[in-house]
Image (cartoon, rainbow, N blue to C red):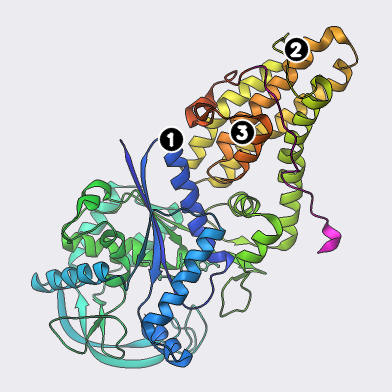
Amino acid sequence: MKTYYITTPIYYLNGDPHIGHTYTTVAADVMARYKKQRGYDVKFLTGSDEHGQKVEKAAAEAGVSPQEFVDGLAATFKGIWEVMNCEYDYYQRTTNPAHVASIKKIFKKLFDQGDIYKGSYEGLYCTPCESFFTETQVENGNCPDCKRPVGKISEEAYFLRMSKYQDALIKHYDANPEFLLPISRRNEMLNNFIKAGLEDLCVSRTSFKWGIPVDFDAGHVIYVWIDALSNYITALGYLSDDDSDYKRYWPADLHLMAKEIVRFHAIIWPCILLALDEPLPKQVFAHGWLQYDGQKMGKSLGNAIDPRALVDEYGVDAIRYFLMREFTFGPDGNFTPTALINRYNADLANDLGNLLSRTVGMVEKYFSGTLPDISTPTAFDQDLIDLAITTLQNAEDRLDKLAFSEALNEIWNLVRRANKYIDETAPWVLAKDETKAPELATVLYNLAETLRILSIAIAPVMPNTPQIIHTQLNITDPTLCEWESGKKFGLLPRAITVTKGPAAFPRVEKEKK
Ligand code: MSP
């Protein structure tokens, strides 16, 4: 069976997650579900990045140990993934003893072979962001990310010999044009960073304790990128007694993240892997930020939107749909409550919700809930059928390129086409003439069959909605829900019995907002 290994970044545990954080994980979950539906052996990894000075400080302020502090927040993050219906296969924590053991081995191995050496570090450091910056990156003495002042620090530290791998990395980029996408980020990394020269990277700290200790040099903790990035392989048992998952799933098919950490994934991580003599991930994809009023959403800017509140109000499938449909995956996207309400009402309440309720309602009204096993074609069927049998393939083509919004647009072309088919065939007119009953049955059958195909197509993005459709159409045969069955028209038994249910997506009134 073909494997598919997909990862999100591991999240810093410094506050409640906001809807911006959920963007990467929802996208990864969509891909994982889509690949599972297509029969892949999928491993979907997420987790939390739990070490560092910020955690140490926050725990001290809260009067708890750092471990207790991160335990609480890791539970909060897991709770959010449950709310967002993100079904990861493994949740890695950098405080997990198995991860800690592997990281120590990785660090020692790199040190023993001369890829890590001891030196001294002087740099401009932003404590809240836990990042060093160069003079050119700093903006008027302030951190380019959070805009707070940076300070000069100097300490004895270990370094990773990144410079040694510059040529190998350039070769890898040249041989693998899709290693880093979108293309704009690839060009930026390759031309502005890699070809400009790689500097060795500071990989340890002595200024705090909350990290994985360097076993052979007391006072040093491994920080941060070897600890954080290597989670992608420690989660598979790399350098542990059981590395069967590593053998099965590595190299990763896809590392997903937002743009500000692409440099770490597309430069530092490959250098670590090259030094370890391990294969590089097949693809790194960096999407843009969810913004609010043109600024990156985040705790520090006070514009964070709580995913729980949105899910309570609209339902999880609607929020997942909105995130994947409204914003092109790649550039930044601007989140606004108005866009959410408009999208919800137009695409979900009107287009999809009405298609289902009209179809079920008409089977009830005209045939007392059970379609007769009779049929005569109408002049409008073939157009609908032609589109229905190509929709999944069209969605596949887009999903394979992570073009979520385009994939959903392809699917909604079919939703809209089916609604148009109702207008064209005018079942309420056919219903007035008893001799037209076979045509009316055909129309309603075709609508039900289209809804079956749609239920398959939307499942990766909207995992709960297919069940609503299946319940109303009484679809119980699991083979009718398999991905490939969505490329065929006419599989649904003709004499279906429907059961009307509550509106799948009740309209949201704008005035209430
Ligand atoms: N711990 C590091 C990642 C280490 S991966 C080996 C980290 N954590 S984070 O919690 O700050 O960010 C996690 C992910 O959420 C990153 O991809 C980050 O870019 C993303 N986002 C945080 N705010 C976001 C938005 N407003 N919009 C989109 N993505 C956002 O970085």
Provide the residue span drawn in magenta: 494-513
Residue density around tag 1, few if under 14, some if 14–19, many if 20 or more, within 10 Å: few
- Image quadrant occupied by the N terminus: top left
Q: Position of residue 338 (x, y in %)?
A: 75, 60
Label 2, label 3: how far apart the Cα atoms are: 21 Å
The mark nearer the N terminus, 2 or 1, is 1
Q: Where is residue 284 in the image (x, y as percent from the top left)?
A: 38, 55
For the residues bearing labels 2 and 1, Cβ distance under 8 angstroms: no
Q: Which residue is drawn at 47% across and 83% down?
A: 143
Q: Residue 454 carries which label?
A: 3
Amino acid type of the residue that numbered disc 2 sits on in the rendered structure:
Thr
Q: Which mark is residue 38?
A: 1
> Which residue does the numbered mark 2 point to in the structure image?
378
Identify which residue, 218 or 171, lies in the foreground.
Answer: 218
Residue density around tag 3, few if under 14, some if 14–19, many if 20 or more, within 10 Å: many
Q: Is residue 69 left or right of residue 464?
A: left
Q: Is the magenta stretch mostly helix, strand or loop?
A: loop
Residue density around tag 2, few if under 14, some if 14–19, many if 20 or more, within 10 Å: few
Quarter residue 386 falls in: top right
Q: Is residue 440 left or right of residue 382?
A: right
Label 1, label 3: how far apart the Cα atoms are: 15 Å
Q: Where is residue 497 in the image (x, y as percent from the top left)?
A: 70, 24
